[in-house]
């Protein structure tokens, strides 16, 4: 029986889910794709800009500021009653303004990092709400994207969704391969998550120790929260004050990873850790187009280079706390699609 699977699979699922859900923005879409519903993911033309104001660097005379641009464009979708195939793409650019140097190697900090990304995803209904799927992400987060094989990241996942009785609950089993993990690179890792959906107002994905919760405690209120061991937290509370306007507040503890082309060791990556507190307002101009503005405070920010978090003292740059502003514009170019029969 699925309910009696060995407990160690739940532990391994924590490792896997760290790589499946690397950002709050990606979580909803990827979890939505694992649902038994077909044709619910919309094609968004999505642009955002986030600017961190100039702040001091600990132990160096130089200041540091950065501006992050993100663009997602709609891709191709093939859909039928029992099959769905998606192709998506995005690119992010981190524009850096600093004269900082890495303290251990004396290299200059790059002027920018770019991350072009291609996503392929397929899922098939086996019977009723039992589905299986495959997804693959190819990317190159680097100051010289795709300059060599050492700047390429590949992440591939297979999943099987097994419904429980006649409810919306389910077990999801995973198998993931990635060449950019902090540990166990190139080794396929199994995983397991339990999906609990007692009503339309509550959805939870529960692994150990991964948690994702989407909850509407009252009309117009919404809570999204997730935790991924050991250092990834997202929590957002929003309130819809009218049909057009929604206010929100959020806390994020997140990290980004880059392959610096001129690093001394190809196994090293450049890690960027930060915590953000923010508040903002979203304006839904139409059902298909919205603008979201937010402002907040970044703290506990630092870069370091190495193989994993244990190397956080090597080439470390600690950035002073400071304010940031963010703007996002999103336009849906299609509607949720009703699958056609084969």
Image (cartoon, helix red, strand yellow):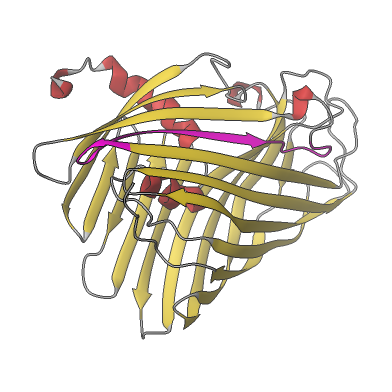
* Residue in the foreground of this view, choosing between 80 and 38: 80
Q: Is residue 145 left or right of residue 35?
A: right
Image quarter of residue 238: bottom left
Residue 100 x, y percent position in the rendering: 87, 43
User: Does 131 appear in magenta?
Assistant: yes
Visible in this render: residue 130? Answer: yes
Visible in this render: residue 230? Answer: no
The overriding secondary structure of the stretch rendered in magenta is: strand
Residue 175 x, y percent position in the rendering: 41, 22
* Residue in the foreground of this view, choosing between 310 and 61: 310
Question: Looking at the image, which residue is at 25% across and 64% down?
Answer: 216
In this rendering, is residue 335 above or below 286? Answer: above
User: Does 302 appear in magenta?
Assistant: no
Image quarter hosting the N terminus: top left
Q: How many marks?
A: 0
Image quarter of residue 338: bottom left
Residue 228 x, y percent position in the rendering: 42, 37
Q: Is residue 203 left or right of residue 39?
A: left
Q: Look at the image and give the residue range highlighted in magenta.
A: 125-145
Question: Looking at the image, which residue is at 74% across and 33% down?
Answer: 316
Question: Looking at the image, which residue is at 58% across and 23% down?
Answer: 182
* Residue in the foreground of this view, choosing between 339 and 38: 339
Question: Looking at the image, which residue is at 84% across and 33% down?
Answer: 102
């Amino acid at each position: 029986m699925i309910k009696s699977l060995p407990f160690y699979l739940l532990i391994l699922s924590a490792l896997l889910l760290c790589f499946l859900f690397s950002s709050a923005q990606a979580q909803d879409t990827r979890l939505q794709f694992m649902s038994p519903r077909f044709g619910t993911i919309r094609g968004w033309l999505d642009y955002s800009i986030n600017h961190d104001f100039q702040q001091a660097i600990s132990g160096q005379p130089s200041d540091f500021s950065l501006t992050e641009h993100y663009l997602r464009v709609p891709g191709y979708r093939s859909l039928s009653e029992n099959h769905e195939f998606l192709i998506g793409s995005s690119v992010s650019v981190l524009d850096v303004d600093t004269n900082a140097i890495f303290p251990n190697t004396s290299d200059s900090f790059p002027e920018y990092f770019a991350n072009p990304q291609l996503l392929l995803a397929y899922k098939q209904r086996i019977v009723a709400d039992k589905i299986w799927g495959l997804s693959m992400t190819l990317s190159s987060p680097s100051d010289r994207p795709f300059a060599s094989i050492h700047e390429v990241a590949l992440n591939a996942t297979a999943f099987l969704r097994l419904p429980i009785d006649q409810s919306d609950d389910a077990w999801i089993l995973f198998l993931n391969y990635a060449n950019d993990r902090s540990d166990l690179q190139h080794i396929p890792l199994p995983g397991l998550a339990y999906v609990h959906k007692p009503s339309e107002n509550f959805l939870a994905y529960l692994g150990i120790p991964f948690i994702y919760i989407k909850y509407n405690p009252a009309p117009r209120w919404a809570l999204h929260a997730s935790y991924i061991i050991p250092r990834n937290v997202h929590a957002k509370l929003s309130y819809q004050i009218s049909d057009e306007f929604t206010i929100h507040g959020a806390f994020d503890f997140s990290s980004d990873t880059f392959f610096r082309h001129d690093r001394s060791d190809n196994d090293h990556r450049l890690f960027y850790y930060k915590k953000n507190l923010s508040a903002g307002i979203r304006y839904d101009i139409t059902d298909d187009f919205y603008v979201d503005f937010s402002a907040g405070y970044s703290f506990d920010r630092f870069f370091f280079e190495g193989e994993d978090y244990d190397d956080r003292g090597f080439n470390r740059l600690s950035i002073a706390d400071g304010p940031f502003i963010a703007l996002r514009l999103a336009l849906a170019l299609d509607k949720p699609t009703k699958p056609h029969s084969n």
